[in-house]
Amino acid sequence: MKLQRGELALGLGAVVLAAGYLRLADGIGESLLSDTVGAAGLPRAVGWALAAVGLLLCVRSVVRAAPQGEAAGAGWRPHLRALGLLAILFGYVLLAPWLGYAAATGLLLAAGAAYAGVRSARELVLVPVIAAFVFWLLFVHAFGIPMPGSLLLGGP
């Protein structure tokens, strides 16, 4: 049985990153106006989630070791796929202020689906439009968080 060192290193890195993130989150001050969760509540939750995922990766690297005859790696293809997803997310961050968050979210979902291999025009149009509308309803009406408008359409 051979230990999967890449997963172990990634898991340990995630745990170390989570520890630093949690340390920084503890430095977020509490306001007199804060609720029971406080300003640091979400950053702490993200930090603990990252630590849990890192620990799971470490455990998985030990429990599910690579078979003896398996190749050491699949090459650059998985890394290039991840970079493609990162480029789509970067495009979302750039376009969101210009198009508005609802439209940019729909485009993000459509681009992600197309990148994942969805070829049906109905799925590439209908699902992102419905999802963007649901996100808009959820944030604006359920949570009461107004979504910023777009620079192109003259919104705030």
Image: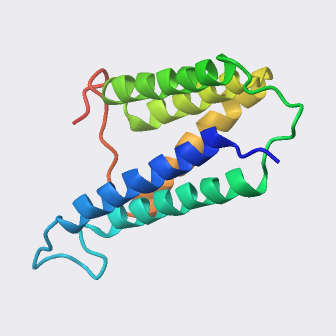
**What residue occupies the far right of the structure in this picture?**
69
Taking the view exactly as shown, the residue that stands out farthest to the left is 32
Relative to 68, residue 41 above or below: below
Residue 52 in the image: above or below residue 155:
below
**Position of 54 compared to 41: left or right?**
right
Q: Quadrant of residue 82?
A: top right
| Camera-side residue of 73 and 85 | 73
Which quarter of the rendering shows the C terminus?
top left
Q: Is residue 87 left or right of residue 22?
A: right
Q: Is residue 92 visible?
A: yes
Q: Residue at x 45, y 30 (%)?
A: 104
In depth, the one of 72 and 142 nearer the eye is 72
Residue 77 relative to residue 89: left or right: right
- Residue located at (37% from left, 29% from top): 93
Which image quadrant for residue 110?
A: top right
Describe the colour scheme in one phrase. rainbow
Quadrant of residue 121 within the rendered picture: top right
Number of marks: 0
The single residue placed furthest to the bottom in the displayed view is 36
Q: Is residue 73 above or below residue 138?
A: above
* x 60%, y 18%: residue: 80
Q: Between residues 22 and 84, which one lies in front from this camera angle? A: 22
Residue 51 in the image: x percent, y percent? Answer: 48, 61
User: Could you tell me residue 77's position as x and y percent?
Assistant: 68, 18
- Res. 145 visible in picture: no
Residue 1: give x, y in percent of width and height: 83, 48
Q: Residue at x 79, y 52 (%)?
A: 64
Q: Is residue 20 above or below residue 33?
A: above
Residue 39, how many percent across, how many down?
Answer: 23, 67
